[in-house]
Amino acid sequence: MGHVFALAMQKGGVGKTTTTLSVGAALAERGRRVLLIDIDPQANLTQGLGVDPTALEYSVYEVLLNPERGLDFAMLHTEAGLDLVPAALELAGAELELAGKVGRELLLRKALRAARSQYDYVLIDPPPSLGLFSLNALAAADQVLVPLQLHAYALRAMPQLEATIALVQEINPGLAIGGVLCTLADRRTGLSQQIEREVRERYGALVFETSIPVNVKLAEAPSHGRPISSYAPGSSGAHAYAALAQELEHRYGH
Ligand code: ADP
Ligand code: MG
C-alpha cells in the first residue's frame, strides 16, 4: 500500500509545489512508483511538468465531480517517469459547485482508494489557502509534509497548521505530521541558520536532516517543464531533493 503525503502550509511561496515535483521526480528516479496530484487551481505543479492546463481532456476537476470513477481516467504518464493527475483552471469554480455536496471533503480520498495500491508514493500538492481543496488533500493523506521557509516568522504559521490537522483528524483520524522540511535555506545569512536551529530544537526528529537551499535552478526549472533532476542534475537543488528522497525511503520504506 502506497504512502500518501499532502504537502501543507497555509501560505504560498514556501516550496510546496517545488518540493512535490522535485522529490517526486527523485523518488521516481530511484525506481519508486510515484503519483503526483495537483489540486491547486493555479496548476503550478502541472505546468512544472510541462503539461498545459488549458489543453486537458480530464483533470482533478472531473475526479472531484465523479470520485466513484477513480483516478485512472484523468491520469497522465509524464516523461519524468511519474504519473500526474493534473489541475485545470476550471478547478477554481469547483469549490462553489461542490459546496452543497455531502461528504465534499472526502472526494479525493474516495477517488484515490483504488489507485493507491499501484504506487509506492502519492504526493498531493494543495493551494495555500484552507479551502475545500486543501481539506480534500489532508483528508486523503496519511501524513502531512510541512515545508517551512527559513525566514523570521517561519514558526508562526505552525499553530494554525496544527489546528487544521486537528480539525481534519475528525474525518481522517490517522493524519499526522510526517516530516518538517526546511526550505529556502540561505547559508550566507545568520538569520536563516538561527531559524533552522530553532526549528530543529522545537520539532526534533520530525525535521528532515536535509534542508533545501535557495538555488536559482529550482526557480528556473518549472518554465522548462522539467524537474530539477533533469533540468540541472548537478545543482545544489537537485542534490538536496535527491537526499530528501533517500531520507523519505529510510523513514517510510520503499
Ligand atoms: P508554494 O507551492 O508553496 O506556493 P513554490 O514551490 O511554488 O511554493 O515556490 C515559490 C517560488 O519560489 C517559485 O517561483 C519557486 O520556483 C521558487 N522556489 C521554491 N523553492 C526554491 C528554492 N529552494 N530556491 C529558489 N527558488 C525556489
Ligand atoms: Mg504551490
Image (spheres, rainbow, N blue to C red):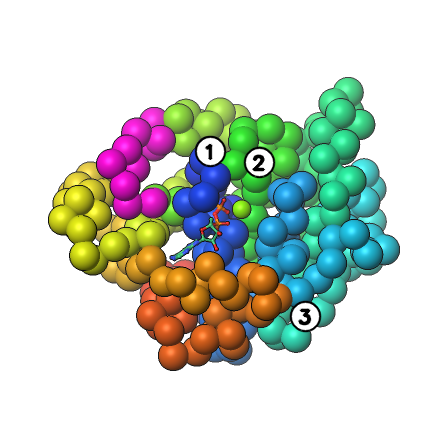
> What residue does disc 2 label?
134
> What residue does disc 3 label?
78
Determine whether label 1 and label 3 are within 8 Å by CB: no
Q: Is residue 198 left or right of residue 32?
A: left
Circle 1 packing at 10 Å, graded few (<14), some (14-19), many (20+), is: some
Mark closer to the chain start, 1 or 3: 1
Residue situated in front as seen by the camera: 41 or 189: 189
Q: Give the magenta range.
A: 149-159
Q: Which three-letter amino acid code belongs to the residue tagged 3?
A: Thr
Mark closer to the chain start, 3 or 2: 3
Q: Is residue 25 left or right of residue 154?
A: right
| Mark-to-mark CA distance, 3 and 2 | 24 Å
> What residue does disc 1 label?
10
Residue situated in front as seen by the camera: 120 or 245: 245
Determine whether label 2 and label 1 are within 8 Å by CB: yes
Per the image, label 2 sits on a secondary structure element best described as helix
